[in-house]
Image (cartoon, helix red, strand yellow):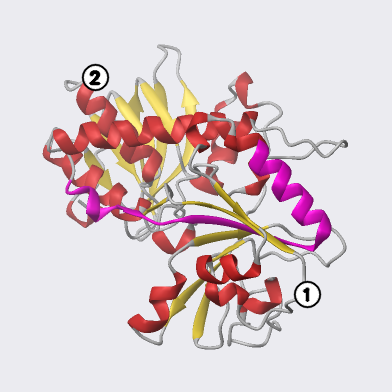
Amino acid sequence: MTSDRGAVPDSSNPDVVLVGGGIMSATLASLFGIVAPDWSVTVFEAGPALAGESSDAWNNAGTGHSALCELNYTPAGPDGRVDATKAVSINEQFQVSRQFWSHLVRGGMTGSPRDFISPVPHVSFVTGDEGRRYMRARYDALKAQPLFAELEHAEDPAVLEQWIPLVMAGRDPQQAVAATRSIAGTDVNFGALTKLLLADAETRGVAAHTHQRVRDIERETDGRWKVTVEDTRSGEPRTVRAKFVFVGAGGGALPLLQRTGIPEIAGFGGFPVSGMFLRSTAGPSWSASTRPRSTARRPSARRRCRCRTWTCGSSTASTRCCSGPTPASPPSSSRPARSSTCR
């Protein structure tokens, strides 16, 4: 499926060009196979492998962005009330994604669901009186929504020790803490899902090329799009012309869309998102207690911390950042900092 096998022919004319070899392009390739099976589709990925960047399991939280634990989807107003509108909308979208994946599984267009999605409780954790008030208000706002009916709330440290034992280990028993938990949470391996979807798409004629960086997209007089592609190994440029172009190239999407000159891109911007993920090196006994996905709210009185999503904190864990070193790591150090710096 990767592009060592084929140079991209000059002036080829696919119906659709998908820029980026991640989950967005893979999803569209699958959709086209259902609603427009006669269309020709070509995927261009600049990297050496498909699903190697934002869709890779180490480069995203894997929560599916279902809003079960992501606190940024439930902002509090000046009066302390939490608005659940965004969280409900996000969760509805995630449910649609699950329905689509179920359709693909039933249609034999991907492997077993166990290959890319697993049940994992989602936990949101806060500290301090302000955090506790916010978490209670968030719980009250979400609990009333059918999609969040199974959400649990706790402020008792003894209960939280059962939910997230390593987060609570060694914590001051007098510290105000609170958390919510959803046992309906899942962990989605978007990298595995991307590869499954594109592997199936290839059997239907989709051409997926790696080492091919899209340099320019230009509208021609006949309405087609001229896409200029450069081989990242040889530097050789090529062009293809397509009826439709989708740009799902992560951080590279914005400048490409700006080059198209489409008016819809005006006013759009991008910003980096970082996170820290922890991987156990201590064997099954340690990893068994790290199962929940935890998201914590940064107290306003503390310093800014780039770490936003993690599973636990322990000196027996090794850390891996998806975007540079952890905040506590000095620039000259190759050793990752402990996650306790981000509690």
In terms of image quadrants, where is residue 13? top left
Q: Nearer the viewer, residue 301 or 208?
A: 301
Label at residue 30: none
Question: Splitting the image into 4 quarters, where does residue 224 fall?
Answer: top left
Residue bounds of the magenta highlight = 111-140
Q: Residues within 10 Å of mark 1 (few under 14, many from 20)?
A: few
The relative height of residue 243 versus residue 125 in the rendered view (above or below) is above
One can see residue 173 in this view: yes
Residue 77 in percent (x, y) is at: 82, 36
Q: Secondary structure at mark 1?
A: loop
* Residue name at image x 79 percent, y 64 percent: 304
- Chain-order first, disc 2 or disc 1: 2
- Camera-side residue of 62 and 126: 126
Disc 1 residue type (three-letter): Gln
The residue that mark 2 highlights is: 35
Residue at 49% over, 27% down = 218
| Residue carrying label 1 | 174
